[in-house]
Amino acid sequence: MGVMIYELVTLQKPFESPTMNGLFEKIRNQPLDPLPDGTSSDVQLVINALLNKEKDKRPSIFDVAKIPCVNKKIEQFIKEHDCKDEVMAYFDLEPIQKKN
């Protein structure tokens, strides 16, 4: 997911190599190119979290849902589509539960 968001923001791949071994080496060791000027801090936070070099520190989809900017969008989606029960069946989102 981090790679897809990075590509949408930058219009380029975060890592490229003509070989799989080279690609894996870059994924493990090459720092990301800076995101374009004007990229929101929320988007930067999500990309950096999802592309963390230490796999144990990368968030799960459930952790991503708890990031404030993502959580806010989920809340907005729930309100627009009246689907709290369906969403809450998958995500335990404390702010949503307190507000409704």
Image (tube, helix red, strand yellow):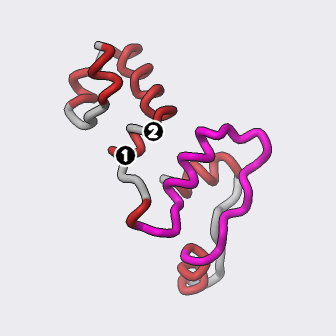
At a point 57% along the width and 46% down the height, the residue shown is 45
Image quarter of residue 39: top right
Q: Which percent across, then down, holds residue 57?
A: 42, 61
Tell whether position 48 is magenta.
yes
SS at badge 1: helix
Residue found at the very far right of the displayed protein: 37
Compared with 85, 68 (above or below) is below
Magenta includes 56? no
Tag 1: amino acid:
Asp
Q: Nearer the viewer, residue 87 or 51?
A: 51
* As drawn, 13 above or below 82: below
In screen coordinates, is 3 left or right of 79?
Answer: right
Residue 63 got which mark? 1
Quadrant in the picture for the C terminus: top left
Residue 75, given in percent of the width and then of the height, sits at 40, 22
Q: Are marks 2 and 1 in contact (CB under 8 Å)?
A: yes
Q: Residue at coordinates 70% horizontally, 52% vertically from top-left?
A: 11
Q: CA distance from mark 2 to mark 1?
A: 7 Å
Residue 90 circle label: none
Q: Secondary structure at mark 2?
A: loop
Counting from the top left corner in percent of width and height, residue 47 is at 57, 51
**Range shown magenta:** 28-55
Q: Amino acid at mark 2?
A: Ile
Q: Nearer the viewer, residue 80 or 45?
A: 45
- Up the image or down, 35 lies above or below 39; here it is below
* Total tally of numbered discs in the picture: 2
Residue 93: quarter of image: top left
Q: How many residues crowd around disc 1 within 10 Å: few (fewer than 14), some, or many (20 or more)?
A: some
Specify the label residue 67 is tagged with: 2
Residue 16 on image: x %, y %: 65, 72
